[in-house]
Image (tube, rainbow, N blue to C red):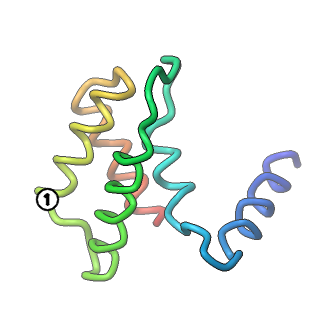
Amino acid sequence: MAGTGVAAGAAVQASAPGADVNAPFVDTLFRSDRPRATDDSPVREEVGRVLVNGLRQGDVSPADRSYLAQLVAARTGLSQPEAEKRVAGAVAQA
């Protein structure tokens, strides 16, 4: 049941004025066991914009999916195929 509370909290936060509704999907893309040594806010913001643009068009283009997977792989240590699966899952959920 704890997951339900977290999901509900995320929904409330995402509905707040000015909230980035893509933030949960971007967070999912960049989950890692690696400690974050630098501020990756600019990359996360770019990923959010790519997602918004793709979803407005009905889907994220293959070129953008590949780019997102490269970013995810570089920052999480996942292999390229694993990063591609993660991107596909996040896009499907978004």
Please tell me which residue is depicted at 71% across the width and 68% down the height of the picture: 11
Q: Position of residue 93 (x, y in %)?
A: 48, 62
Splitting the image into 4 quarters, where does residue 72 fall? top left
For label 1, the crowd category at 10 Å Cα-Cα, with few meaning under 14, some 14 to 19 and many 20 or more, is few
Q: Is residue 32 above or below residue 69?
A: above
Displayed quadrant of residue 56 = bottom left
Q: Nearer the viewer, residue 43 or 72?
A: 43
> Residue 7 in the image: x percent, y percent?
74, 58
Residue 60, horizontal then vertical, whole percent? 24, 66
Residue drawn at point x = 53 percent, y = 57 percent? 23
- Left or right, 53 with respect to 92, comes to left
Residue highlighted by disc 1: 62
Comparing 47 with 66, the one in front is 47
Q: Is residue 35 above or below residue 16?
A: above
Q: Residue 46, how many percent across, how many down? A: 32, 56
Q: Secondary structure at mark 1?
A: helix
